[in-house]
Image: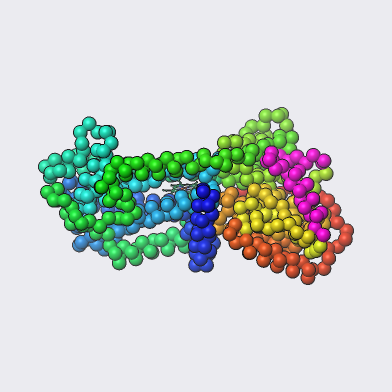
Amino acid sequence: MIKAVQALLRGAFDVAERGLDRLFGSQANPLAQLGALGYFLFWIVAASGFYVFALFDTGVTRAFDSVEWMSGSQWWHAGVMRSFHRYASDLMIVVMVLHLAREFALDRFRGARWFSWFTGIPLIAFLYVCGITGYWLVWDKLAQYIATTSTELLDWMPIFGEPIARNFLDPSALSDRFFTLLVFLHIAVPIVLLFVMWIHIQRISRPKVNPPRLLGAIVLVALLVVSLLMPALSQGPANLARIPSPVRLDSLYLVLYPFADRAPGAAWGALTAIGLILSIVPFLPPRRQPAPAKVFLDHCNGCGRCVDDCPYEALRLTRRTDGAVYQSEAIVDASKCVSCGICVGSCPSSTPFRRSQDLVTGIDLPDYPLARMRADLVAACAAMTSGPRVLAITCKYGGGASLRAGADLAVLELPCVAMAPPSLIDFALSRRHADGVAVIGCSERFCHNRLGVEWTRQRFAQERDPYLRTRVPRERLATIWTSSTETSTAKREVDALRARLSALPPPSSAPPPVASEPVRERTLS
Ligand code: HEM
Ligand code: SF4
Ligand code: SF4
């Protein structure tokens, strides 16, 4: 059931993202920047909120007039800021829901990844409280409707000694003190929200919290245009002597209100069910997680490349414990490791040219060690009977996952293409295991392991260690970035590589000398 929903959502996202790729390019595609957009919108809401608050009168009798004044004679600055505040808050809900759906569709919430998912859940609640208290502060008819419905909803639960809905039964009961409490909530909850947003990304290295400039500029211009064309306005002053009807509801923040109004008990039930479902999702089957990466001290010199490359903050360097001449050693935090294998690809000891029978590297995946990767590569390539022989190194989450081995195609599937050290490609070509290599990862806008595509690109461009050596003939290598639903792209590109290989002269028969990977200055990015 979960798998079917994920497949459906993934297909929908993929179609939308490919369309947006054409408009924005893969780097600025908004659907690939949802977390960063959430942060960006938060800052817009905070800045416009400060502006509006400076002109807002917090007294219950004067609040409405001060907001009217802003949207009336002061529309050109305060009114625009009010609209910015409202529309950026609305957009934040849209972005958050899409972000949740996308992380779910792409299966990035299980195992060690549970943390970001779990800490995302309170963000939903805090964002809603911020929005609802914001509407309440305007003290117009909509605010009155929100006040009565919210308090009836709260009173349904036996939390407060006295029913708080009484405060809204007649004008004399409503005090400035209650209103000040609302103002406090509307300022304090966003601070808590920001704190939880910070916790949310603590297990992610190099989190994207700023969208590309172009995307940021587009969002700002779009907000300005909407603010000028459809300024945020109030719905007439609140009047506790009358039932506020009809009111226009914000369909994002107040979506549950008509329901809560009629059946508060069922509304609580729905909220509890949503909370529970979201909380248990990361712990549902399949439960088995691959074993975390393991350090082999005899082969670790403490260079720190794996620490730089790990996308999930699962590695750090610590003081050497085995008396070796090196100062540091890598250490894995198993609770954060998602077993992507990127660290295996980073380690200078991961060189398949090593003659040792038992190929051991500095850091390895127990479930799929480097020695097995090399053996699988050799065996898969040996099974090819006709040429040009292409070795496809695929990521199991990208479009290459659908490729099947054949007479002229060997497939080596990895948890992430960045798990393959660049020397593995050198090994495959220089030892004549294959005539060409196609590295087929996830699409550029989405890497299941966040940084695998970026690191592979940088290693191949010799911008990041371990880099792909100059002697590797680039005309025999293809890098293909394609999503799991774009299966035909992977096949087409492999065919194109094969056609290119057919036109090349056969490689010289003498194999190049065997050399271990040269040690270069570390590249920190
Ligand atoms: C105010 C709302 C939110 C903001 C601003 C936000 C922001 C972010 C950011 C910046 C990242 C890091 C993206 C990257 O660099 O790869 C992230 C990751 C993530 N978020 Fe959110 N988020 C929000 C709400 C949520 C919610 C409601 C959920 C789900 C319940 C969620 C689930 C996740 C998950 C699972 C990841 C980690 C993906 C991975 O393992 O690579 N987020 N979020
Ligand atoms: S496999 Fe390596 S790179 Fe991937 S999360 Fe674990 S320690 Fe980090
Ligand atoms: S990359 Fe290899 S050698 Fe360097 S610290 Fe990590 S495990 Fe040790």
| Magenta segment | 356-385
Coordinates of residue 516 in the picture (x, y in percent): 79, 48
In front of the other: 373 or 71: 373
- Tell how many labels: 0
Is residue 47 in view? no
Q: Is residue 84 left or right of residue 434?
A: left
Coordinates of residue 388 in the picture (x, y in percent): 79, 64
Q: Is residue 119 left or right of residue 437?
A: left
Coordinates of residue 302 in the picture (x, y in percent): 67, 38
Quadrant position of residue 189: top left
Q: Is residue 358 magenta?
A: yes
**Residue ID at (72%, 52%):** 412
232 lies above or below 137 = below
Furthest residue to the bottom? 503
In front of the other: 247 or 514: 247
Q: Is residue 62 magenta?
A: no
In front of the other: 272 or 42: 272
Furthest residue to the front? 1
Coordinates of residue 136 in the picture (x, y in percent): 24, 48
**Residue ID at (30%, 59%):** 83
**Residue ID at (80%, 45%):** 354
Is residue 446 in view? yes
**Residue ID at (47%, 40%):** 280
